[in-house]
Image (tube, grey):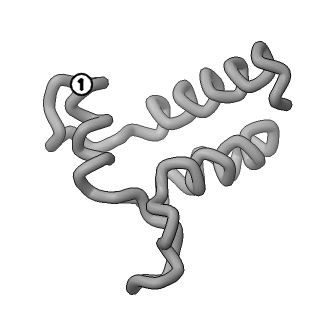
Amino acid sequence: MMSWNLVAAVGRRPDLWVEGVRTLFAVSPRDWWRKAPFLPVPDKAYADWQLATAHGDSTIALSPQDLILYLEWRKKQHKALGRV
């Protein structure tokens, strides 16, 4: 679940704003606008799977540092693939 401390962490990094938005839409269901809360929110099962993959436990909350590292990694991958 997205929390304000995650938003604030990305907010302090203007170089990651575009990647943050790109990632938000990439991990959200394609028809997110059809269901409440009508926001691009990642599917809970997908988010749990990502946390279990990263930490071995889906109950661990995503830390701001983890999010920043993930966005930096995605940005580097897009740049390496020429998708800047």
| Residue 35 image point, x, y percent | 40, 83
Three-letter code, disc 1: His
Q: Nearer the viewer, residue 63 or 39?
A: 39
Q: Nearer the viewer, residue 23 or 10?
A: 23
Answer few, some or many: residues within 10 Å of disc 1's Cα (few below 14, many 20 plus, some between 14 and 19). few
Residue occupying the point 59% across, 45% down: 23
Name the residue carrying label 1: 55
| Residue 67 image point, x, y percent | 50, 36
Q: Where does the C terminus fall, quadrant-wise? A: top right
Q: Nearer the viewer, residue 33 or 55?
A: 33
Q: Residue furthest front?
A: 30
- Against 79, residue 13 (above or below) is below
Hey, which quadrant is residue 79 in on the image?
top right
SS for tag 1? helix
Residue occupying the point 44% across, 64% down: 41
Hey, which quadrant is residue 78 in on the image?
top right
Compared across the picture, whether 47 is left or right of 35 comes to left
Q: How many marks?
A: 1
Residue occupying the point 68% across, 19% down: 77
Q: Nearer the viewer, residue 5 or 45?
A: 45
Residue occupying the point 47% across, 84% down: 34
- Against 63, residue 35 (above or below) is below
| Residue 38 image point, x, y percent | 49, 82
Q: Where does the N terminus fall, quadrant-wise? A: bottom left
